[in-house]
Amino acid sequence: MINETAPLTVPQAIRARRSIRHYLPDPIPVERLTELLDLTLEAPSSWNVQARSVVVVSDQEGRDGLAWATGGQPHPQEAPVTLVFVASSQTWREDLSDVYEQARKNGAWNEQFIAGFSQASLDFHRDLEERGLLREYAIKDAVIAATYAMVTAASMGLATSPMNGWDECKVKKVIGIEDRDDLHIAMLLPVGKAAEERRHPGRRPLAQNAFDGRYGRGYDSVPGRTVRV
Ligand SMILES: Cc1cc2nc3c(=O)[nH]c(=O)nc-3n(C[C@H](O)[C@H](O)[C@H](O)COP(=O)(O)O)c2cc1C
């Protein structure tokens, strides 16, 4: 069971996290939720375009709506908050001067870098558009942010459950974007205090899913290398 008082380290949080399907009704204090969102949006994004956002659903109408959109699964109904991760496939076309201004102010990127980078970003995204990959790339950013949210929540003693089992049109309707073709649902993540204990269902051995240089060559099969499995 996740410790609720002391924040867990990243490795502890990763090991303690389980997908939790039942939640206590206790609300999440607003400062904790804000910190969770802040750390979630620290996630990296392709070209720092930040083509992902989070809709925090906590009111009864929204929770009922998400229960409907997930075919009656209990977690979005019971959890005090569900984070809906939205991917945007058109943000790269919009005005990103604020993004570049921040990087300039932070001393991260200079003028010359910004000029080259912004042009390269446009070229990259136009190519994705031609190949029909804009949605896929935006979804990657949103899912990485959701992963940050899961680990951060676990470190705070909060339970989560990543969810794929939903109808995209229905989720979009619940959060008020049913008419937006440029926005896509990447993941639902109920968050709250666990009302059940879940055992680790286990993972396949490292050698089965970690490879050395070539797909299928088990990482621990390399002569002389010792790997804990
Ligand atoms: C992308 C993704 C989608 C998932 N969708 C659902 C879901 O819709 N409903 C559900 O109960 N669990 C869902 N899960 C949870 C998985 O069943 C769970 O992660 C897996 O059984 C391993 O358990 P653990 O997370 O406790 O390690 C999902 C997990 C992932 C990564």
Image (spheres, rainbow, N blue to C red):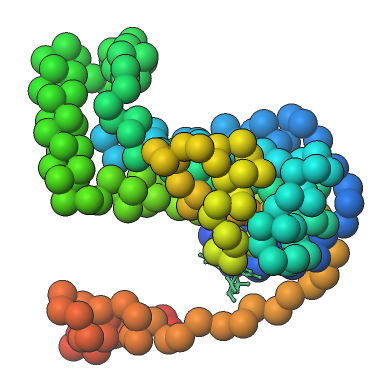
Residue positioned 57% across, 32% down in the render: 38
Picture layout, residue 34 above or below residue 97: below
Residue positioned 27% across, 26% down in the render: 93
Is residue 179 left or right of 57 when viewed as pictured?
Answer: left
Residue 193 point in image, percent of width and height: 81, 55
Residue positioned 22% across, 51% down in the render: 132
Picture layout, residue 173 above or below residue 205: above
Residue 26 point in image, percent of width and height: 88, 47
Picture layout, residue 150 above or below residue 47: below
Quadrant holding the C terminus: bottom left
Picture layout, residue 164 above or below residue 83: below
Whether residue 217 appears in this view of the structure is yes
The residue at the far right in this view is 25
- Picture quadrant of ligand 1: bottom right
Residue 126 point in image, percent of width and height: 16, 37
Is residue 223 left or right of 161 when viewed as pictured?
Answer: left
